[in-house]
């Protein structure tokens, strides 16, 4: 079997509500989902979700190769980007291609990827994550009520701009999950998306912990600030979770060495091989690992085969336009199917025919870091659900 070519598509996730974090909000609730499809001479096509950046140059490292040699091909792609480096969107392109190769390998073996990787149980623990900072109280309750209907017992909220607002919203979600009857003590996490400096993080989390118990706080300071993350971890009861924006083991090593991470995360967009290597590194330090992503299907398969998986992020309960996934959410967990490979089917005609698009580079999107992030004197009130007015200051 040999790799013969690739195709790229971009579809969208329609959330039906505003989604975002402390850095910004997609008010229309539409986000991009780039897809890479890798073809072989035996008619098997693999699917990977991730960027297409510099894909011609990266694909040259694997063209004509046997796709079943996945981990070796992963390293070939890394070497292909040696001079310019592989961070950022380039790493995402490598991850998308890597995921597609794992899909091919498992399809060729006639097995779901979770079984090929050595998983025993196709059930993967999940927590709810609504990207919810732009929601009203009523919307927040409704969104997490839907998660609760699927048995979710833990939730991660976006926050970091106003401590009183964060406490209020966490309390609302805790009550929603408790009322569902699945657990008397729901798990709560808060994701600040790197919006604080060190002292802001300690003050903000400490204030919340007077009234609420947090399992973890996510990205309280900048992703590479090993000393700062370690400072926060020592100063609060909650674990510090980070890693979704780290690209390569070389970026994890200084954080782990500094005691700066308690829950090791890795984004689904970076690929299966990356996740497996990060999970092994974390396991060597007795640290749990947790996948992140809108559609983390590939890492869910991989999570079944590692001993230190903690829980995986469940964002949207519905797939992107033109994408179907052999996956269910039951009793608070992902349940993977028996389809060979990833179990992902792409309707290329439907995606091409769709006119829906997302403006991911808008100045007020979560992808653009605000100018005053990490150096705000006062709290910032929520942005109105249906306006693009500037954020207004409130009492910190």
Image (cartoon, helix red, strand yellow):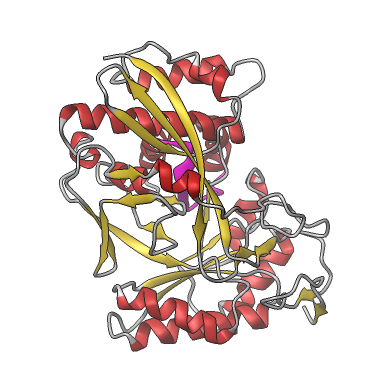
Q: Residue at x 50, y 85 (%)?
A: 172
Location of residue 340 with respect to 122 vertically, above or below: above
Location of residue 307 with respect to 48 vertically, above or below: below
Residue 288 in sight: no
x%, y% of residue 227?
Answer: 66, 47
Observer-nearest of 345 and 375: 345
Observer-nearest of 174 and 52: 52
Observer-nearest of 309 and 372: 372
Left or right? Give the position of 238 relative to 136: left
Location of residue 238 with respect to 339 vertically, above or below: below
The quadrant where residue 347 appears: top left
Q: Residue at x 74, y 78 (%)?
A: 381
x%, y% of residue 30?
Answer: 57, 60
Observer-nearest of 133 and 266: 133
Q: Which region is colored magenta?
A: 258-271
Residue 212 in sight: yes
Q: Residue at x 56, y 49 (%)?
A: 260
Location of residue 6 with respect to 210 vertically, above or below: above
Quadrant that contains the C terminus: bottom right
The quadrant where residue 203 appears: bottom right
x%, y% of residue 18?
Answer: 60, 69
x%, y% of residue 146?
Answer: 38, 77
Quadrant that contains the N terminus: top left
Q: Residue at x 25, y 37 (%)?
A: 341
């Amino acid at each position: 079997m040999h790799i013969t070519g690739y195709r790229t598509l971009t579809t969208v996730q329609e959330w039906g509500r505003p989604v975002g974090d402390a850095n910004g909000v997609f008010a229309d609730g539409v986000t991009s989902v780039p897809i890479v499809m890798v073809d072989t001479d035996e008619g098997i096509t693999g699917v990977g979700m991730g960027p297409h950046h510099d894909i011609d140059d990266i694909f040259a490292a694997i063209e004509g190769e046997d796709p079943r040699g996945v981990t070796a091909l992963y390293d070939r792609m890394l070497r292909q980007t040696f001079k310019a480096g592989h961070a950022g969107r380039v790493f995402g392109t490598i991850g998308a291609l890597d995921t597609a190769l794992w899909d091919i390998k498992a399809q060729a073996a006639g097995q779901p990827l979770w079984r090929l990787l050595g998983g025993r149980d196709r059930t993967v623990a999940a927590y709810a994550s609504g990207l919810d900072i732009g929601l009203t109280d009523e919307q927040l309750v409704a969104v997490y009520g839907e998660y609760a209907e699927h048995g979710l017992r833990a939730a991660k909220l976006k926050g970091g701009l106003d401590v009183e607002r964060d406490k209020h919203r966490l309390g609302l979600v805790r009550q929603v999950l408790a009322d569902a009857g699945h657990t008397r003590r729901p798990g709560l996490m808060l994701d600040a998306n790197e919006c604080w400096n060190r002292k802001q993080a300690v003050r903000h989390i400490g204030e919340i912990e007077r009234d609420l118990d947090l399992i973890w706080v996510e990205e309280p300071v900048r992703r590479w600030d090993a000393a700062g993350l370690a400072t926060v971890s020592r100063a609060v009861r909650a674990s510090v979770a980070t890693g979704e924006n780290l690209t390569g083991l070389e970026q994890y090593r200084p954080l782990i060495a500094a005691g700066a991470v308690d829950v090791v995360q890795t984004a689904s967009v970076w690929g299966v091989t990356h996740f497996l290597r990060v999970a092994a590194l974390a396991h060597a330090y007795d640290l749990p690992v947790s996948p992140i992503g809108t559609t983390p299907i590939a890492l869910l398969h991989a999570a079944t085969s590692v001993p230190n998986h903690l829980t995986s992020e469940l964002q949207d309960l519905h797939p992107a336009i033109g994408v179907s996934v052999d996956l269910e959410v039951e009793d608070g967990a992902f349940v993977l199917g028996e389809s060979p490979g990833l179990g992902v089917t792409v309707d290329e005609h439907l995606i091409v025919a769709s006119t829906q698009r997302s403006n991911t580079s808008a100045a007020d999107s979560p992808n653009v870091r605000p100018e005053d992030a990490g150096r705000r004197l006062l709290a910032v009130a929520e942005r109105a659900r249906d306006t693009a007015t500037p954020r207004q200051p409130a009492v910190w």
